[in-house]
Amino acid sequence: MRPSIFRSVQSAVARNSPRRSYSTHSVPERKVAVLGAAGGIGQPLALLMKLNPLVSRLALYDIAGTPGVAADVGHINTRSEVSGYMGEEQLGKALEGSDVVIIPAGVPRKPGMTRDDLFNINAGIVKSLCTAIAKYCPNALVNMISNPVNSTVPIAAEVFKKAGTYNEKRLFGVTTLDVVRAKTFYAGKGNVNVAEVNVPVVGGHAGITILPLFSQATPKANFSDEDIKALTKRTQDGGTEVVEAKAGKGSATLSMAYAGAMFADACLKGLNGVPDVVECSFVQSTVTELPFFASKVRLGKNGVEEVLELGPLSDYEKENLESLKPELLASIEKGIKFANQS
Ligand SMILES: NC(=O)c1ccc[n+]([C@@H]2O[C@H](COP(=O)([O-])OP(=O)(O)OC[C@H]3O[C@@H](n4cnc5c(N)ncnc54)[C@H](O)[C@@H]3O)[C@@H](O)[C@H]2O)c1
Ligand SMILES: O=C(O)C[C@H](O)C(=O)O
């Protein structure tokens, strides 16, 4: 869970003849599609994926604005070929042959809203995009960013089940931003080097369902129970902190693009056979009694290689784990119901 994307980005930028360098190396061809690529997350995410030397083709899809984003990003002298696709009739072409599909399509929160308030609009968007994924690239790893993640991931699973393409190893809710925040806040409060910090974050991706496991954080810092409570609350409210600071202009976009690019990079490394790639993600799970749950996941050539157990929890974390379950289960069930009734 180290920010290896920086190393990837630095080495990509350092190369002036990327195509020549890659034609002589055994880096596999990998196509990545970004759905919602003209949005607040989509644009910086497109930039970061263009800087990733593991990507050979980058497909940027949105309902509007992608020709401009693709022309702009496409001028960067890194490995991947960039194509822009706009409107539903071009969605199939955007998806065909994709190894990884990243979905930041949909509306963001405004102050006073919960992520669940986005359900009515985003559930339909995710459902139609996943229907197309099942048709055009059923074997792709799907990285779901669109909120509410606690419901959109179960929606995607149901859509894929109906299409007969569901493989639980290939569907991921992107919770990396919770880990990114937990690391930043922990390092800031503990005055330790942020680059060395690791904090697993489990559960889901909304309010109290976000459960950072600071008892397992490394390197160890000497925090009081009150400090841990404050760090936990700040991590859980990180999204709201940004929504309020943006005052009606949306939610986290830049930190999310960073987190989304990190997670996609981990998926690509796993696909390419890099060993010991472990990230937290909201996946189908038996780690608790809930059908989906975020925890550490080992990534490999088929997507999820192993969903890791939670490990030892403090009493405070045990309590929080029990408290989050009803809300998380309700969000999961809401997604499943939506996918099966509409
Ligand atoms: N998982 C996370 O940690 C996390 C973090 C931040 C934001 N988000 C979520 O990501 C989503 C996007 O946020 P944003 O700030 O980029 O919003 P945005 O409004 O800036 O961008 C969304 C983009 O989606 C596009 N879009 C809408 N319908 C589409 C469709 N049917 N097909 C393809 N594209 C479509 C829009 O045209 C727009 O360009 C929101 O739901 C937000 O809550 C999740
Ligand atoms: O808070 C939001 O609505 C966006 C996102 O889920 C986040 O955590 O920043």
Image (cartoon, helix red, strand yellow):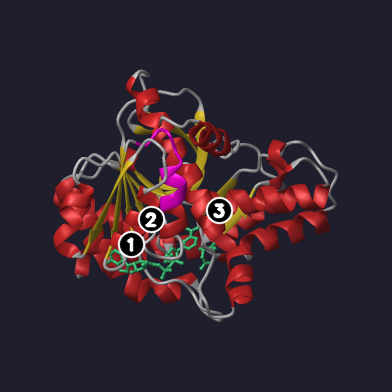
Disc 1 or disc 3, which is closer to the eye? 1
User: Looking at the picture, how far across and down is residue 240, in whole percent?
Assistant: 60, 70
Contact (Cβ within 8 Å) of mark 2 with mark 1: yes
The residue where tag 2 is placed is 72
Instruction: Tell me the quarter of the image containing the N terminus.
Output: top right
Contact (Cβ within 8 Å) of mark 3 with mark 2: no
Magenta-drawn segment: 46-55
- Callout 3: SS: helix
Residue at image point 16% right, 47% down: 136
Q: How dense is the environment of label 2, judged by Cα within 10 Å: few (below 14), some, or many (20 and up)?
A: few
Q: How dense is the environment of label 3, judged by Cα within 10 Å: few (below 14), some, or many (20 and up)?
A: many
Tag 1: amino acid: Gly
Label 3, ligand 1: CB separation under 8 Å: yes
Q: How dense is the environment of label 1, judged by Cα within 10 Å: few (below 14), some, or many (20 and up)?
A: few
Tag 2: amino acid: Asp
Residue in front for this viewpoint, 105 or 62: 62
Horizontally, is 202 left or right of 159 in the view?
right
The residue where tag 1 is placed is 68
What is the spatial separation of the Cα atoms under label 1 and label 3, in whole angstroms? Answer: 27 Å
Horizontally, is 234 left or right of 70 in the view?
right
Q: In the figure, 239 relative to 263: above or below?
A: below
Label 1, ligand 1: CB separation under 8 Å: no
Does the magenta portion include 52? yes
What is the spatial separation of the Cα atoms under label 3 and label 2, in whole angstroms? Answer: 26 Å
Residue in front for this viewpoint, 217 or 284: 217
Instruction: Tell me the quarter of the image containing the C terminus.
Output: bottom left
The residue where tag 3 is placed is 177
User: Looking at the picture, how far across and down is residue 20, in whole percent?
Assistant: 36, 25
Whichever of callouts 3 and 2 sits on the residue coming sooner in the sequence is: 2
